[in-house]
Amino acid sequence: MIAGPEVSHLVAQYEAACGTKEGTEHTSHHEETERAQRVFFENVEKLSQAMKDMGNPFQEESRDLLSLDTKDIAHHTAAELIGTHLEKCKVRFQEFMKGLEGEEESTFYEPIKKNRVDFFRQVPASVDSSKQKVLKEDCLSTVLQAVHIMPEQRV
């Protein structure tokens, strides 16, 4: 909370004015200490040094869509998906607003489906189930034929 330290100072001043015991104690935000400020400054320096050494990850020269932390390159269909993602969300928002204008209370309290799309971990489209079924039948018939032929060869 950004206003947390300021609120605690106002409360302390109020308690001091009222004469309560808690108002006389030092009440400062835990991030106002010298140590916390020093640690924050050191972390900022480490980050800026890493960006100087390794380069700015936001200025990547590649035309591919990639993850900043792992440098995984997304499939080309992911770039197309991102291009259409904004439009799909706008359409969903417009439908939600039309439901509100229609004064339907159920649309306001109805949960909105989240758009959880992982652009970098997409599973390739599976083979058509009818093709899988044919392949399984072919394999099964081949195995059955081999089992049927084997006893005849022993005799």
Image: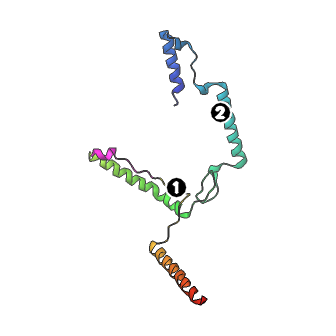
**Callout 1, which amino acid?**
Asp
Residue drawn at x 67%, y 27% as measured from the top left: 35
Quarter that holds the C terminus: bottom right
Q: Position of residue 138 (x, y in %)?
A: 50, 80
**Callout 2, which amino acid?**
Phe
> Would residue 4 be counted in the magenta stretch?
no
Q: Looking at the picture, does residue 107 appear above or below residue 45?
A: below
**Residues shaded magenta:** 104-115
Q: Position of residue 95 (x, y in %)?
A: 34, 52
Compute the Cα span from label 2 to label 1: 32 Å
Residue marked by disc 1:
118
Q: Using the image as rendered, state which of residue 140 and residue 44 is in the foreground.
A: 140
User: Total number of numbered labels?
Assistant: 2
Residue 40 badge = 2
**Mark 2 Cα-neighbour bin, 10 Å: few <14, some 14–19, many ≥20:** few
Residue 131 badge = none
User: SS at mark 2?
Assistant: helix
